[in-house]
Image (spheres, grey):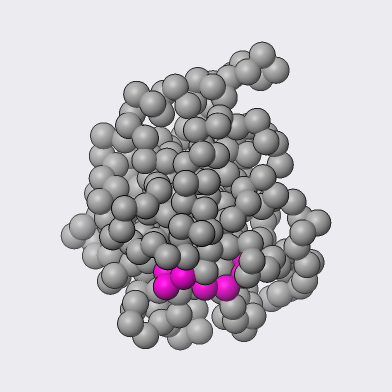
Amino acid sequence: MRRNLPAIIVLAFIIAGCGAATTGSSSGSVGPAQTAAASSEPTSPPSAASTPSTAAGTDDCDTTNVTILHQAPAFEAILPASVADRPMAKWSVSGRCWLKVVTGLPPSELDGLLAELQTAEDPRPVDVSSLTYAVAGRSDTTGDPPYFTFVTARAATDKEIQLALFLLFGGAAFCDLATAGDLSAYEERTLAGKQVYVGTTEMLAQNEHQRGRPYLYQNDDYMFLVIADDDAWVADAIGQLP
């Protein structure tokens, strides 16, 4: 994984590192990455009536309750509707809205962040339309375990893939973003007939909103992250993925 992404992204995630995330709550005054991770927790299945129109900008990106956002319904459809006989609630964001959800930055600062990604080595602007992210989490916060399945697109350029991975890992409250994508730190397993890389509980913040290990799986089109501490649950979830 490249490590030259703007410091402001890394700083946002450090603010909400494992120490803060283990004691914070979804309503506490915490860093932006913690807010994104905690908000992966739907309070109830989103209804069609609350579904806003698909948008990649930030004008229609209300982060007060991200679980009512459905900016990428096609990506939500990729994720399982239920796992281990428990229905999953889904939400999704795309483009600049995903950046806003994770970093908490206003539009003007997002422009500066994206400009920093244009280097002498690769002066092309980031195609924010390639940033697409969907989450399937527990629909019953009182009875279901805090497990999640995430998906993001495999972008066209290495720069955009790395940005998507930083946002994916940061939103999932990985303790060390610099090594989160280092597959040598994971155990390679076969689950549901797919090649999966399994991390450790120490890699993630463990709290009331999420519990377990990271499971990484990808194909030619998508990158997936599953968080759970139950291999059978994970096998069911991954078995339903393309």
Task: Say whether residue 209 is magenta.
Answer: yes
**What residue lies at 42% left-to-right and 54% top-to-bottom?**
34
Looking at the picture, how far across and down is residue 120, in whole percent?
66, 14
Residue 7's x, y, as percent? 55, 32
Query: Looking at this rendering, what residue extends furthest in the left direction?
Result: 49
Q: Position of residue 114 (x, y in %)?
A: 49, 26
Q: Nearer the viewer, residue 178 or 128?
A: 178
* Magenta part of the chain: 207-214
The image quadrant that residue 186 belongs to is: bottom right
Q: Is residue 146 above or below residue 29?
A: below
Which of the two residues, 20 or 47, is positioned nearer the viewer here? 20
Q: Please identify the quarter of the rendering in which residue 229 is found.
A: bottom right
**Is 210 placed left or right of 188 in the picture?**
left
Residue 141, compared with residue 78, is above or below; it is: below
Task: Answer yes or no: is residue 237 visible.
Answer: no
Name the foreground residue: 208 vs 69.
Answer: 208
Q: Is residue 123 left or right of residue 104?
A: right
